[in-house]
Every structure is written in C-alpha cells, then in structure tokens.
Amino acid sequence: MIVTKLNLPRRTVLRGLGASLALPLLDAMVPALTPVRLSAAAPVKRLASIYVPMGAYMKKWTPPTEGPLELSEILQPLEKFKDRAVVLSGLDMQNADARDGGGVHSRIQPCWLTGQHAKRTEGPDMQVGISMDQVAAKAIGNETQLASLELALESSDLLGACDLGYTCAYTATMCWRGPSTPLTMEYNPRAVFERLFGTSDSTDARTRLADMRRGKSLLDSVSSDMVKLKKRVGPGDQAKLDEYVDAVRDVERRVERAEQQSGRELPSVEQPAGIPTEFKDYTKLMFDLNVLALQADLTRISTFMVGRELSVRTFPEIGVPEQHHGLSHHQDQIEKLEKQAKLNVYHLQLFTHFLERLASTPDGEGSLLDHTLMLYGSGMSNSNLHLPYDVPTIVFGGSTFGIKGGRHVRHPKGTPLTNLQLSLLDKMGVPADRFGDSTGRLEI
C-alpha cells in the first residue's frame, strides 16, 4: 500500500532570533511515496565509545563463567541491560607496551581507540594513529551536522602533571583525526549545548550572560515555527515533537541551574560555569546531552571520556576520598582494591543512566538503544602493574547490529582489541581492511 503525505527534508531545522533547532527523526521525513509499513527501511546506526581510566579490579570484574552472562560483582548495575551486553575477555593492546620506556598512561589512553603506539615526545611532533570513531566519522559523518561529538568530564586545561617525556595531548583526548591531529574533547555542558544548538549572534561573553539572565530559551525563539509544524504533521510525529521539546527544556533548565550553582559555590578557574557541583549530576547531564545529539541526528558518532589517565578526581560521595590515580596504585592491598571495585561499580551505575535514556527515546520502530552500538571499557586491567592486556571490555548492540547479548566470551591470549574494533566498524557499515594492529575480525 502506497500513501502520499507531508515530506519534510531530513535535516529540517526551526530558526528564530539567531537560534536554530534540529529536529528528531519524524515519520514526515520519510519520502512522501513510501509503503505504509516502514520496517523495511534500514534504521540509522550510531556508534558510541565510553572510556573509563585506570583499569578495574579484575577479580570482581570478570564474569565467573563463559557462555551465558553471569554478572560479576562489579557488573551488577547492568542487570536490567544484561540481555544487551557482551562482555569480552582476553583482548590485548600490544601497542601500548613500554618499548620506549616510561609514559605508561600516555601510551595506554591513545592506544585504546587507535591500536597504535604513541611516539615518545614532549613536542608538537606527536604520533599515534586515527581513532576508530574518526574512521567512522570520515565514512558517515557527512550525513549529519557534526561528523562526531567528543565529550569528557575533565578539562584538558587542568591536566597538571603529565607523563615525563610525553606530551599532555596524549591524555587530553581519546580522539585522533589523524596520526598527529588530536581532537579537543568538550567538558562544559553549556559549551556542548551551544555547539549542538547554537547561541545568540554575539560571541561576546557579556552579551551571552545578559541573554541568559533575561531567561531567553532556545525553544522560545523557535516556538512559533514549532506550533506551525505540529499542525502539519500526524499524531505520531506530534507526540515525538512533544517528547523532544520536553528533553530540550529539561537540559536547558539543568544547564542554567548548574551554571548558577557553580558560580556561587566554586572558583571559576577550577570549576567553569555550567558544570554541576556533584559528579553524579555532571555525568548524567553530559550523558543527556549525548542522547539529545543522537536523538536530533546532529551526529551519529560520539566518544565519552569518563576520566583521563592520571586523573586525580576523588569520590567522597561513595566513600572513596583518595585520588583516582593514587588509588590505582593499590599494591594489592585489599582495602584499596575494594575501593577500586566500588569506583568501578559507580562508573557503571552512572553509565546505566545513558542506557536508560537511550532505551526510553523512540527511534524509528524501536529506540535509540536498539540503533546504537556501544563500546565500554578501559585501557588496562591490573592498574598497579599498568597492564594493557585482558582489558575490561563490554559491547552493547541489539538485533539491528546482529549481536546476541547476554554472553561472556573469552578470546585467546594475545587477541588484539583492534580485532573487535574492526568488527564494530563492519557493523556500522564502514569498510576497512585493517585497523591499528588488527590481525582479523571477531565474531560478536
């Protein structure tokens, strides 16, 4: 059965007062002459990489059995999404080895998404390799407003000490457009929001501040066009627009509130405006912005750095007052190992907020979670020894990607992590003969 209907361009935006708002995927954006049943259309695929620094307490991370997934103590927060998860053991990062001496963290972090060895240098002649996200971005990034989105929870301006002999660029980002071209990761929610949805015509800080104080909202500036659009689309699209508007309003509200709270409570040098005081709130807000970018199809490729290698962040809210880097040098002391496990659990608990938001956001005939392929992991296992072998790794991907979840798969010792990443690129429809130090592909 063929029907005719309103046909909106896929990249339709609403504009007003210097602002523009991209829209989520609506039924009206499907070509006007299409079968009523749209399930045959290939869903939009998205790729997200989430990095947590300085390893895990592997004894409590690794599932006790292979085959059907039996969640370990650390993996318990994933219970609700167990059927979506594939935990992979035995994957190594050989190119993060110590062939040049020193620079443990500066070798491990860039290797995680590139599979390449970071050149030892403190100068501008850095050398790693293109990262997996950017391989995908080069292939499909022209289909969206942003080829990729790079998010972090720590500022590169506040890095402090770096590995001796290595440029701080290696621990400032996860993303490399080319072997010597690192991409900046955005850590300020306000800046992320403006990158996604724009701001006033003026870039003057005082003008923008005055604009915010007047309570001007992005949606306010396009409200009349939104009303007109809702009258033109069907009930299903109207419901999608209402949900999308609510999501944008909620993020706007929390960014504004976080800005006000940060300005009152913390020095601007250490805590830039727009960053919530509580790490939990900060993380959830940034994940929500990530979801919003995917929902609006502003990008289909995102990278999220929960923390950088050498991070000195503390977590007193969960009973871990020690700096993360110091705690990672546990020297096999059970008290420190238990705190590391507690931190591993906390990171996964916060990550499940991302999963829940993706699962509750409609996308085509399913949800964003159905159409998003995710890699979650760290660049080392035993953090005390800085081992880049048998690194903690989880893949999330539904039937859209032909991945059966609810499994723990152990691969032979020496299997490159890049074999998995090459397979993930395949799932995204991005052709590549090799990636990093890959030796083949994995069945996932």
Image (tube, rainbow, N blue to C red):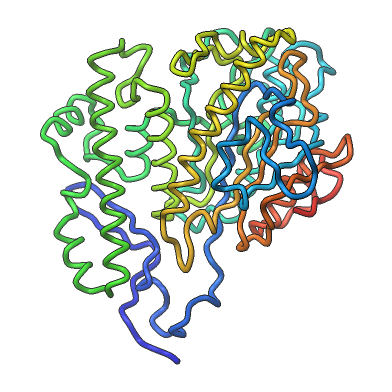
Quadrant showing the N terminus: bottom left
Identified at 47% across, 53% down, the residue is: 359
Q: Nearer the viewer, residue 195 or 201?
A: 195
**Residue with the most extreme bottom position:** 1
Q: Is residue 214 left or right of residue 438?
A: left
- Indicate the position of residue 320 as horizontal and vertical percent values: 52, 13
Q: Position of residue 348 (x, y in %)?
A: 55, 33
Q: Say which of 355 and 205 sits in front.
A: 355
Residue 281, horizontal then vertical, whole percent: 37, 29
Which residue sits furthest left? 214
Against 48, residue 92 (above or below) is above
Residue sitting at x 73%, y 16%: 104
236 relative position to 177: left or right = left
Which residue is at the front of the view, 122 or 34? 34
Above-or-below relation of 344 to 338: below
Q: Exactly how many numbered labels are in the figure? A: 0
Residue 120: x and y, percent? 74, 17
